[in-house]
Structures are given as structure tokens and as C-alpha cells.
Image (tube, rainbow, N blue to C red):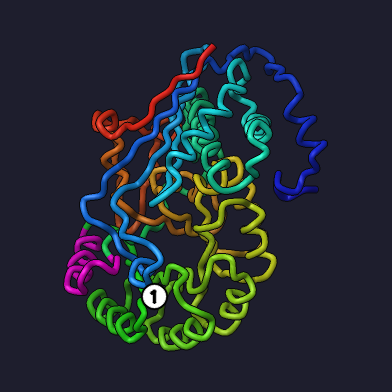
Amino acid sequence: MSIDDDVISAEQHRRRADQPSTPAPGTSDRIHSLRLRSVRLPLPTPISDAKVLTGRQRPMTEVAMLFAEVTTTDGITGLGFSYSKRAGGPAQFAHAREVAPVLIGEDPNDIARLWTKLVWAGASVGRSGASTQAIAAIDNALYDVKAKRAGLSLAKLLGAHRESVRCYNTSGGFLHTPIEGVLENASASLARGIGGIKLKVGQPDPAIDLARVAAVREHVGAGVPLMVDANQQWDRATALRVGRTLEEFDLVWIEEPLDAYDVTGHARLAAALDTPVASGEMLTSVREHVELITAGAVDTIQPDAPRIGGITQFMKLLVLADEAGLALAPHFAMELHVHLAATYPSEPWVEHFEWLEPLFEERIEIVEGRMVVPNRPGIGLTLSDKVPGWTVGDVTIDE
């Protein structure tokens, strides 16, 4: 049996895509229209991680969002989104606009088949990267439709294991923030009820990283979960040397110590360190994550549903991660990942970023170190009245 659509034969894909949609008994609903919006969300402060300090990227000033709204003939509208940082937003919008017309008139319940149909509509640009990130927004919207039809939250529709998930804050620990500010942010996060703190590392001088980690550990105390994230900026020798020095701080994990595609290096590092190794956020397909899993390259896997093609692909990956006995900590997009993490059999982590909050009317409740899974139907999000002012592209595709 295949573990991913990536490895299904071309002929199987064509047969699936060409099969007519037959409604289930008593179901006559069809996709009537899709609205796609390209939105540029400005960030209050330019953001720098190790990739900026090593000269590989410029500070981040905005997040490019792709919103998909799928409306059915029964009058149900589902909202989904994808995103990109620094580059890729226009490409996602253009690709979604090009392939979305193939869904008009289709049964919105057939989400897996429709994912395959969208992939084949744009097959020449592949099954990862911007193409499947564009599909992710539509895929997520279809799940929102299905959950709303059932009157269930997304987590309940998929099968939840818990009503809340552990959470940790990342946005307060970036490298552009002086250590005094990082300590203040950590205190504020813990006071808000967030359960852990993640600190960015990976600077050209590891001594600075170690001093910052020591300061944060002393400030928050031994009992607070603490993670670090090098954003792929260490070579193998540096990762091993710094990783061994970091053992004394009792970290939950060391994240992206090496290039995201250095599977062999991650496997060797994971075997050499007591501290768990985490990675996966930069990967854009299930197949790439399978390479990490097969090689034993991570202890904690960090998939991003918008990046790997949406909920359809994410749920495939969760089965593989669970079978491998991995911990789960989805990357970014807490508004979506709080639902998906709640379906994982073992206790996961969800990353707290407040960056996307201005886009939505709703807020996630945080209590005693945990995010409460929203019980509103679907993903449970409504776009705020600020979104039109940040919209740079808007198209509706209908019958």
C-alpha cells in the first residue's frame, strides 16, 4: 500500500482524477464557487532569525497569505488558508487561480479525490513547493465545509484525542530582540498561561547563543520547558559541539540544527545527542518527511499543513509519525494546527505565534500551559474587517 500520493503511479492518478463524482445517498451538494484572496499581512517589527544574521535572508516584514473560500450549492462556505514568508505569495495565488476552476460542480465531500484532481491540473510544476501550498488553502477550506456540515469542530471531525494541547511561544525569542527583551517576553508569555519558551539561536558566534540560552534558563527556572531553534545555520561539526554544550540546559529539543535537507547529518546528530532533535517545517511534501522518518533523523517532527499540501497530506503524515514513535510539534499557523495536533495519539506541542491574529475575529484560549481546541464548527475562523485593506489580489471563480 502506498504511503503518499507522491508515490502512486501516474496511471492511478489519472484514473482517480478522471472518475466522475458520484454523490453519496441523500447528498446533492456541489461546489458553486471559489473565492481566492492574496493578502499581505504587515508585521509590527522586522523579524530576524539566524538566516538574517548569517546574511542569507533579509529581515521579514510581512507574511503573504492565500485565503480560499469554497461555497457550495447548499449555501455552506468553508475558509482555508496557506501562507509564505519573504517570497512565494504571488506564485501561490497565481497557481490556485489557474487550477481552481476544475472543482466547479464537484462534490465537496470528496476531498482526497479533489486534492489529486488539483495536483493533476498543475502537474507540470510538481507535487511540492508553491504548487501544493496553493492547493493547501483549498484543501483546508474543503475540510472547513465538511466539518461545518457535520456541526463539528475540525478536530472532532478528524477524531480528537484531547480537548487542549501543550503550547510554547516562539515570537518573543527572535534574534533581533536584545536579551533583556527576550526575558521580558518570556515572563509575559508564561503569565499569559503559555507552557514553554523557544529561543532562536544559530548566530555566527555560538558563544552569544550559549549566553542567551543560559540567561533564559536562569530567568524562567528549571521547571519551564525550553527549546532552541538554529534555523538551519550550523554545519555538522558546530551542531555537534554546540549541541553537546546545550545538554546542560535540559532542552525539550534542538530545532533545525542543520540544513533541512541534510537527512544524514540530522540522523548522526540525533544518535549522538541526549537532547531530542526536531525538524521538518521547511519540507513541502510527505515524501520529504518520510526520508527523515526512515533515516531516524528526528525525534520530534514538525510538519506544516499549509506547506505540505493541506490537511489531506498532513493526516497521512501523522499516521507515519505515530508508527515511528515520534513526538509532534507542527510549525506556525496555530489557528489550524491546534485542531490537527489534537488528533495525534501522543501528547503534542503547538507553536504560539500571535502574528496572524489580526486576520481573524476569533482568538485561541490558553489555560495553564495549553491551547484549548476551539469547539466552533469547522476550523472556527472568520476573517476580520482589516483583511480588505491588506488584500492585493481577489478573484471569484464560479459556474
Residue 157 coordinates in the image, percent (x, y): 54, 35
Give the residue at mark 1.
202
Residue drawn at x 26%, y 49% is 43
Mark 1 falls on what kind of element? loop
Q: Position of residue 341 (x, y in %)?
A: 49, 50
Residue pictured at 28% horizontal, 52% vertical: 61
Residue 183 vs residue 210, the one in the foreground = 210
Q: Residue at x 30, y 46 (%)?
A: 365
The disc labelled 1 sits on which kind of residue?
A: Gly
Q: Splitting the image into 4 quarters, where does residue 386 fall?
A: top left
Task: Reply above or below: 28 against 310.
Answer: above
Residue 311 appearing in the image: yes
Residue range in magenta is: 173-191
Q: Position of residue 3 (x, y in %)?
A: 73, 50
In reply to whether residue 2 is colored magenta, the answer given is no
Does the rendering let one see residue 169? no
Q: Report whether 39 appears left or right of 42.
A: right
Residue pushed farthest right? 11
